Amino acid sequence: MGWSHEVTPSKRLLHGRNRIVRRLIWVVVIIAGYEIIRRGLEISPLALPPIVEIGSAFFAGFGEGDLLQQLVRSLILIAAALAAGAGAALGLALLSVRRSFFAELIDGLVAIFHPLPGIALLPIVILWFGTGTASLLVIIIHSVLWPMITNLTAGLRGVSPTQIMAGKNLGMGRSELFFRILLPASLPYIIAGMRIAWARSWRALISAEMVFGAIAGAGGIGWYLYSKRVFMDSAGLFAGVVLIILIGVLVEDVVFRRIQRKTVERWGMER
């Protein structure tokens, strides 16, 4: 009875295909509109390069290996910073939930640093850590930490006391209670926090790389954009922007949407 509303795999597959088709239609509309505006207003190719040139620059960047190498470097930094930030956020959120003293302290820190853009900390970070990889990691972790703490704390505080009491009555210890009750019940908040953290960290990384430039003879996707702008390679610049958009869409649709479908939606935990 309780699962009568569950979406079947065939319906889910059909819905996914329809979503892809609709998205492709909008992509075609945007590309057509871009070309119509560019040609109709006779805009210089330096400002709005033709779609064909953007596509050529995109595939040439991967063919030469530069774009792929810089993308991989950026994604590795993002993964390391997300892991570190998520671990720190989990520890601080647990302290905030269990101890009122820490709750006041952490809430105060969140109120101070959450609205502060990572790019605004660049002068201080450069002063303390230089312009190396450590500075990039600090900027990204700052962008990840505060939204993760906010969502984790909200999720842990929102767990029903009845669920916790039921777990204790079943003889669960503190660690078992956390992994079998608190963590699954907080999952919608955790996924939402990871989505926000990913988006903020991706923006922070691109901005920081454009400021720092190449580090130890290598650069990320932000440096790729900066170098294309310096050499007035508009097609390459637009190709880099397209790649950033594609990565964002893939992470949202392939990673987060799949995690949500396999956990929150399957368990009937949507809020």
Image (tube, rainbow, N blue to C red):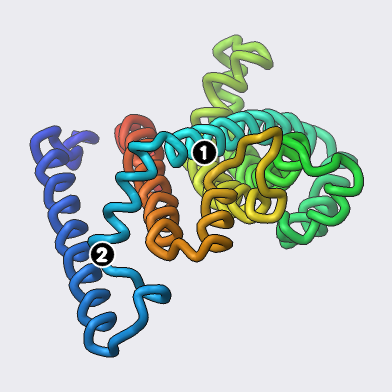
What secondary structure is marked by label 2?
helix
The amino acid on which the numbered mark 1 sits, given as a three-letter code, is Gln
Please state the total of marks drawn on the protein image.
2
Q: Is residue 210 left or right of residue 130?
A: left
**The N terminus, quarter of image:** top left
Q: Nearer the viewer, residue 2 or 129?
A: 129
Q: At 70% across and 55% down in the image, what residue appears?
A: 211
The tag on residue 54 is none
Residue 90 figure quarter = top right
Residue 255 appears in the picture as rendered: yes
**Image coords of residue 173 (percent x, y):** 65, 11
Q: At 62% across and 48% down in the image, what residue appears?
A: 205
Q: Nearer the viewer, residue 164 or 110?
A: 110
Residue 97 appears in the picture as rendered: no
Q: Is residue 235 left or right of residue 128?
A: left
Q: Nearer the viewer, residue 249 or 98?
A: 249
Q: Which residue, given by chain and number where applicable, does mark 1 sit on?
A: 70
The amino acid on which the numbered mark 2 sits, given as a three-letter code, is Ile
Q: Nearer the viewer, residue 191 or 116?
A: 116
Residue 115 figure quarter = bottom right
Q: Residues within 10 Å of mark 1 (few under 14, many from 20)?
A: some
Mark 2 to mark 1 CA distance (whole Å): 23 Å
Q: Is residue 171 left or right of residue 267?
A: right
Q: Which residue, given by chain and number where applicable, does mark 2 sit on?
A: 51
Above or below, comparing residue 242 to residue 193 in the picture: below
What secondary structure is marked by label 1?
helix
Q: At 61% across and 22% down in the image, what residue appears?
A: 178
